[in-house]
DNA sequence: TGACAGCCATCAGAGCTCTGATTAGTCTCC
DNA sequence: GGAGACTAATCAGAGCTCTGATGGCTGTCA
């Protein structure tokens, strides 16, 4: 089975190219792509926990800890203990963080829009559906789970 | 523009799930996914340079240096200077490396086969074509290049 | 011959990502 | 009340990935 036949190589190439384009888009705002994703979710749901944030951003809690550490040392977010559950830490964007997010989002959304413009609505729908089915196959295949 | 509308989140999810499945598949052979990819190409084209290997595996030369360093310290590859061009280093799989590759490949190809089995040939073709068009858009869009 | 463009290899540094393990608080059910 | 399950946060360690910079070799062309 050659590389070209494998879905993995196609997916990897495309995902990487898109990430590179987005990285270039958010860089002027001083952000990385994961930092942008975290700020994006955070701004919509202020006070969310790091664990929940990790789930939304599709990374592990450990990874999110790393991302938040960098965001906090750049003063783009603030973290304070939850008033009732002190072991839970609430995270919020700072004004500086929101400004960086706005700047990054404008350009990142632009990348997505230009990309979407290269397809018809039906094609985009087909692509999303097929990707969802790949995801479903990977999640549900009992052999994959145990291998 | 919400997360769900963006192609990026779908691509990221699927690419990550597939990588996770492949990582589990090649782990018993003592390999990571990038190491498996490097060994795979290396075994088909013995003596290839690290720079060329990097291009085939879709990573930068610097990243490939890291991967090769780990493979070499595990004695899965051998590196010797090119007889004529001494600044070029030829890389080859060792017998140990080939054994690990065979073991990993059997399971990794199995993941791809089970995944492919969830689709018709036409669907797979559509998916590959659409992904290629995404890649093309990202590569050719002059705005993306400069942003 | 010598400047220069083009590769190859690699160091340095930063950031992301994972697995594994630890610590601590909450909640349910006996 | 207390055991066990669950969740949150985080440390430790390994590996991948990038950008930026450096040094070396080759081949072209004035």
Image (spheres, coloured by chain):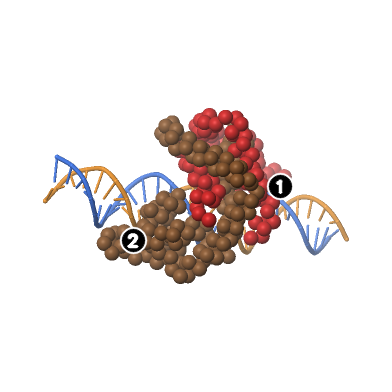
Chain colours: A red, B brown, C orange, D blue
User: Horizontal and vertical percent for residue B87?
Assistant: 29, 59
Q: Residue at x 38, y 53 (%)?
A: B52
Please identify the quarter of the rendering in which residue B27 is found. Answer: bottom right
Spatial distance from mark 1 to mark 2, Cα to Cα?
Answer: 58 Å
* Chain containing mark 1: A
The answer to whether marks 1 and 2 mark residues whose Cβ atoms lie closer than 8 Å is no
Q: Residue at x 61, y 31 (%)?
A: A122
Q: Residue at x 54, y 61 (%)?
A: B105
Characterize the local packing of mark 2: few (<14), some (14-19) or many (20 or more) Cα atoms within 10 angstroms.
some
Visible residue check, residue A27: no
- Circle 2 is placed at which residue position? B89
Characterize the local packing of mark 1: few (<14), some (14-19) or many (20 or more) Cα atoms within 10 angstroms.
few
* Number of residue marks: 2
Compared across the picture, whether B134 is left or right of D20 comes to right
User: Horizontal and vertical percent for residue B115?
Assistant: 62, 51
Same chain for the residues under marks 1 and 2 in the image: no
Compared across the picture, whether A27 is left or right of A80 comes to left
User: Horizontal and vertical percent for residue B11?
Assistant: 57, 42
Please identify the quarter of the rendering in which residue B46 is found. Answer: bottom left
Image quarter in which the C terminus of chain A is found: bottom right
- Circle 1 is placed at which residue position? A85
Q: Residue at x 37, y 58 (%)?
A: B48
Q: Pick whichever, B131 or A77, lies toward us.
A: B131
- Residue B6 image label: none
């Amino acid at each position: 089975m050659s590389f070209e036949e494998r879905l993995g190589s196609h997916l990897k190439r495309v995902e990487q190219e898109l990430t590179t384009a987005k990285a270039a888009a958010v860089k002027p705002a001083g952000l990385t792509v994961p930092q942008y994703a975290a700020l994006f979710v955070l701004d919509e749901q202020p006070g969310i926990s790091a664990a929940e944030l990790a789930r939304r951003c599709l990374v592990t809690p450990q990874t999110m800890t790393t991302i938040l550490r960098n965001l906090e040392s750049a003063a783009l977010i603030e973290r304070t203990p939850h008033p009732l559950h002190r072991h839970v830490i609430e995270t919020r964007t700072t004004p500086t963080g929101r400004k960086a997010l706005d700047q990054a989002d404008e350009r990142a959304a632009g990348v997505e829009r230009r990309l979407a413009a290269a397809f018809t609505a039906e094609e985009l729908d087909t692509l999303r559906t097929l990707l969802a089915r790949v995801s479903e196959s990977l999640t549900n295949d009992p052999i994959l789970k145990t291998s």
